[in-house]
Image: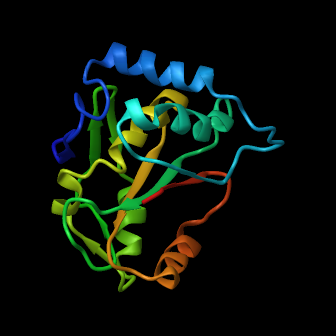
Amino acid sequence: MSNVRETAVAGTFYPAEPDRLKELVQQYLDEAVPAPQPQPPKAIIAPHAGYVYSGPIVGSAFKPLAGKMAGVQRVVLIGPAHTMAIEGLATVSVDAFATPLGLVPVDRAVVEGIQSLPQVQVNDAAHSREHALEVMLPFLQTLAADFAIVPLVAGSTTGEDVFELLRRLWGGPETLIVMRRP
């Protein structure tokens, strides 16, 4: 893929070395105490700081998905915009996001479908240095081999706008929602 959003925080928020990163993510998942869940969650909310600060909590949030991601084809990622002020929600024009563990494809069809919503804009600059979504990708890559993402960062927006977006993207068991706490 030639149109890739390169890593912005590998080596600072999490390890840049693939083997160390995979080992650390697996450690956080292994050490997490899972809450009893009869079914995997449809949505999770987790913090998005550097792994040294948030890794164990993120591991706990993702632990219920371990071994249960086989049917997930799409992960909707929504996090706060930290690096620039934006109105509404920003998605991307790229085809994939890179991490030290490899490329994660963007679900282009879904991204193009939500651009008809007035609160959604394409803004690659809002994603270029943003960490909120990037730090989740190695956890997802460790838990699932084949999925695509719908990346969105939220700026000045309303609960109603986010609700309308989620209603459109909710889907069935093929879709997982991952939201980042501001």
Colouring rule applied to residues: rainbow
- Residue 113 lies, in percent from the top left, at 40, 72
- Residue in front for this viewpoint, 55 or 133: 55
In this image, 14 relative to 94: left or right?
Answer: right
Residue pushed farthest front? 53
Residue drawn 72% across the image and 33% down it: 34
In this image, 170 relative to 93: left or right?
Answer: right
Count every numbered label the image shows and give the total: 0
Q: Is residue 134 above or below residue 156?
A: above
- Residue 96 lies, in percent from the top left, at 29, 45
Q: Is residue 39 above or below residue 141?
A: below
In this image, 66 relative to 24: left or right?
Answer: right
Residue drawn 37% across the image and 43% down it: 49
Q: In what quadrant of the picture does the N terminus appear?
A: top left
Q: State the image quarter where residue 126 is shown.
A: bottom left
- Residue in front for this viewpoint, 66 or 170: 66
- Residue 67 lies, in percent from the top left, at 67, 29
Residue drawn 42% across the image and 60% down it: 182
- Residue in front for this viewpoint, 54 or 120: 54
Q: State the image quarter where residue 10 is shown.
A: top left
Residue drawn 21% across the image and 67% down it: 123
Q: Is residue 150 above or below residue 26?
A: below
- Residue 26 lies, in percent from the top left, at 51, 20
